[in-house]
Amino acid sequence: MARILFENASKRYPNGFVALENLNLEIKDKEFVVLLGPSGCGKSTTLNMIAGLEEVTEGNLFFDDETVNYTPPHHRDVAMVFQSYALYPHKTVYENIAFGLVMRKHPKDDIDRRVRDAAERLEITHLLDRRPSQLSGGQRQRVALGRAMVRKPAVFLMDEPLSNLDAALRISMRAEIKELHRSMQTTFVYVTHDQAEALTLADRIVVMRSGRVQQIGTPDEIYEHPANTFVASFLGNPPINYLDGVLSVEGGKVTFVRGETRLDFAPDRGKKLLSYDGRKVRLGIRAEDVDERAEAADGEVIGGTVTSVLPVGSDQFLGLKVEGQELFFRVNKDLRHNYGDQIKLSANTSRLHVFDADSEMSLIG
């Protein structure tokens, strides 16, 4: 098994482009780490550096206590699953899964045992004689997983493996990958831009932007305590709402003020903001952190004009213009509102986020 350590690692290309800058990251043995971020943030570069497909141009990369900066890919004991599946069209499912073992000259009986064991665990035993062209997208993805599984690698790398699948199949495949990690007890590093995959699969998430790490933490830490507005915006559906305003501190109470809107922070959050009287801030309100109560304290109310009502099955997204700004909230599907209605929602003030208006960094941690 393997512990992976990046120590001040960077990837710079000859033309001067910096794909990854000063990465310090420890991935523990048997941990499931998800690299999350938009296209071009450096997550696939990080994965390729682990695989040996990209050179570490500055700093060091360790597997356990051994530097692997110049170790070729075939000596790193890693297996990789790609977005494109990368199956051989002229080979059967059995031959595709067995290919890596054949190339490494494993005994035939060992190859057969490993292939059939992987196929049984992935429920594709009945497909072993078929060719990739005869398979669905989900079945091809299972074959790609099986080909990596039989290697019994120290590190299992996945580069957006589910992005080509439809929504329903992605959900079921997430469960299969989670179970695969549990049963294999191997270090997993998974790249995605899909927040739902990250929150579902990860032991820890590494949020990246423009080649730099923004925050590292458990899914709950990342969601509940985002380090900055970028991290807060990247997780949540609909995305977190923002209102720009100022903080007012009076009598030990901290209030966010924008126009007629005044929201009092719950004591646990407010005590962290007592020194920021008059500070220009960006308030963050998660879409689910409101409800419609007949009676709510004055410091909990968000009022505005309904601009859209979007049913999404179990609940609905409500567009609300507040102080000239469009916000979206997730509310009970039984609530009935029409375009143009003036309504008031109660905010959960113990879950408000607040960021510095200039640096965009969290003021409450």
Image (spheres, rainbow, N blue to C red):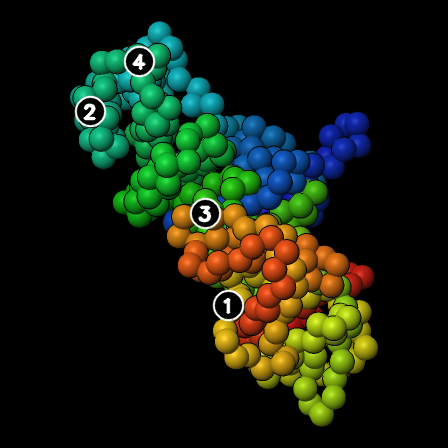
Spatial CA distance of label 4 from label 1 is 50 Å
- Packing grade of label 3 (10 A; few <14, some 14-19, many >=20) is few
Report the residue marked by disc 4.
Answer: 134
Report the residue marked by disc 2.
Answer: 125
**Residue 5 visible, this angle:** no
Say whether disc 3 or disc 2 marks the residue closer to the N-terminus.
2
Q: Amino acid at mark 2?
A: Thr
Q: Are marks 2 and 4 in contact (CB under 8 Å)?
A: no
Residue at 39 percent of width and 52 percent of height = 314
Say whether disc 1 or disc 3 marks the residue closer to the N-terminus.
1
Report the residue marked by disc 3.
Answer: 312
- Label 1: which secondary element: strand
Q: Are marks 1 and 2 in contact (CB under 8 Å)?
A: no
Q: Position of residue 181 (x, y in %)?
A: 34, 44
Closest to the observer: 1 or 291?
291
Q: Position of residue 11 (x, y in %)?
A: 68, 37
Q: Amino acid at mark 3?
A: Val
